[in-house]
Image (cartoon, rainbow, N blue to C red):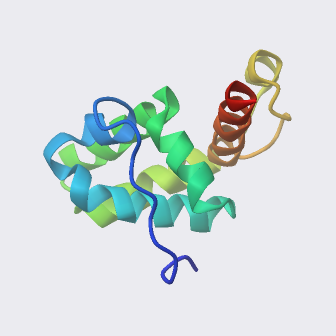
């Protein structure tokens, strides 16, 4: 889907997904960007914002957990993506973040982080 578009570079190489992935960040970044964009239908720029956020760090924790269980990097990213897409936003998270109940967790937080970044830039 996004293979013809350039992958935006991280703007947070110390924290977020990139910082958590450490020495695997270069290989993991384009795989995660594409997997999340394809799963959520959100643009790469929105996915970059998500991965650079604290939520991206938590996503990377789930990738690291899959790696620890012996999965290859691409499989670990796909496992984390499917895990996050399988969760849905509950009442408490909806109230705290303003994300609609029932939305896939990954989609909700990709959109949420983009809205937060846009509001800070305004």
Residue located at (67% from left, 40% from top): 114
Q: Nearer the viewer, residue 62 or 29?
A: 29
Residue located at (55% from left, 41% from top): 50
Residue located at (76% from left, 16% from top): 96
Q: How many marks?
A: 0
Counting from the top left corner in percent of width and height, residue 71 is at 24, 58
Image quadrant in which you'd find residue 37: bottom right
Can residue 76 be seen?
yes
105 lies above or below 80: above
34 lies above or below 103: below
Image quadrant in which you'd find residue 75: bottom left
Counting from the top left corner in percent of width and height, residue 43 is at 64, 61
Image quadrant in which you'd find residue 100: top right
Counting from the top left corner in percent of width and height, residue 13 is at 30, 38
Can residue 71 be seen?
no
Could you tell whether 80 is left or right of 100 in the image?
Answer: left
Q: Nearer the viewer, residue 7 or 65?
A: 7
Counting from the top left corner in percent of width and height, residue 32 is at 42, 58
Residue located at (69% from left, 64% from top): 41
């Amino acid at each position: 889907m996004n293979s013809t578009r350039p992958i935006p570079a991280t703007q947070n190489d110390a924290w977020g997904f990139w910082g958590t992935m450490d020495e695997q960040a270069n290989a993991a970044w384009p795989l995660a960007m594409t997997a999340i964009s394809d799963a959520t239908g959100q643009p790469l720029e929105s996915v970059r914002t998500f991965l650079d956020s604290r939520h991206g760090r938590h996503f990377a924790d789930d990738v690291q957990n899959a790696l620890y269980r012996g999965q290859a990097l691409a499989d670990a990213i796909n496992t984390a993506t499917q895990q996050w897409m399988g969760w849905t936003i509950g009442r408490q998270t909806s109230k705290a973040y303003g994300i609609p109940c029932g939305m896939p967790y990954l989609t909700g937080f990709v959109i949420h982080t983009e809205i937060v970044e846009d509001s800070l830039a305004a």
